[in-house]
Image (cartoon, rainbow, N blue to C red):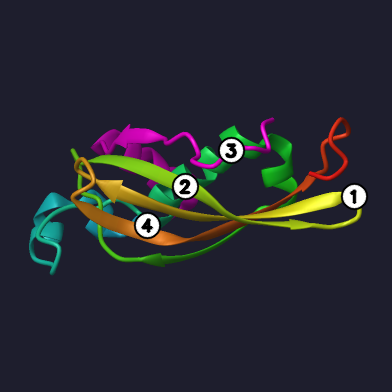
Amino acid sequence: MTTDVKNLSSVVRTITQEQLNQYADASGDHNPLHLDARFAQTTQFGGIIAHGMLTLAFVSEMMVSAYGRCWLESGSLRVRFKGAAYVGDRVETWGQVTKREQHETRQRITCSVGVRNQDNRQEIISGTATVEIEKDIDNPHG
């Protein structure tokens, strides 16, 4: 794990109907907005959209990649959903370390995070992620 990360490595995914079907089964969220094209066309979205929590999971995947078990044990997200991802959209996470707070044996890291779709044309999620990590043993000052 690298603690000197400024920009986090992004996660890029293309939203597929199969992915939405699997997420609906796993989560129990079978809202027709995510599964029924005919119904979804009658909504304000005009088509099937991904579950918001599915797109948010990509942010968590990015944080696990950067901070591993520390994210799983201490990570938290505070986000705002700003738009929708549609079937066929290519979504990409982004993250940047914005603050480091030193404590006796741990460091609290705050990151700005989000998800954009279609080659950064629209931000669909934005917010902050925080994680606590152990201080580097070789570098006791963080």
Q: Residue at x 47, y 34 (%)?
A: 9
Task: Out of 126 and 42, give the one closest to the viewer.
Answer: 126
Q: Which callout, 3 or 2, points to the residue nearer the camera?
A: 3
Q: Earlier in the sequence, mark 2 or mark 1?
A: 2
Instruction: Find residue 34 and name its label.
Output: none
The residue carrying mark 4 is 52
Q: Secondary structure at mark 2?
A: strand
- Mark 1: which amino acid? Thr
- Pointer 3 residue: 5
Quickly name the residue at label 1: 105
Q: Residues within 10 Å of mark 2 (few under 14, many from 20)?
A: many
Q: Nearer the viewer, residue 108 or 64?
A: 108
Front-lying residue, 2 or 43: 2
Instruction: Return the x and y of residue 76 as percentages of the image width and height.
Output: 63, 58
Q: Earlier in the sequence, mark 3 or mark 4?
A: 3
Q: In the rendered structure, are the residues bearing label 1 and label 4 in contact, judged by CB atoms less than 8 Å apart?
A: no
Using the image, determine if residue 48 lies above or below residue 78.
Answer: above
The verdict on residue 6 being magenta is yes
Q: Nearer the viewer, mark 2 or mark 4?
A: 2
Relative height, residue 50 to residue 62 (above, below): below
Disc number placed over residue 95 in the picture, else none: 2
Q: Position of residue 29 (x, y in %)?
A: 40, 56
**Front: mark 3 or 4:** 3
Quadrant where the image shows the N terminus: top right
For mark 1, does the 10 Å Cα neighbourhood hold few (<14), some (14 to 19), or many (20 or more) residues? few
Q: Amino acid at mark 3?
A: Val
Mark 3 neighbour class, 10 Å CA radius: few under 14, some 14 to 19, many 20 or more: few
Describe the element under mark 4 as helix, strand or loop: helix
Residue stretch rendered in magenta on the structure: 1-28
User: Which comes before the other along the chain, label 1 or label 4?
Assistant: 4
Amino acid marked by disc 4: Gly
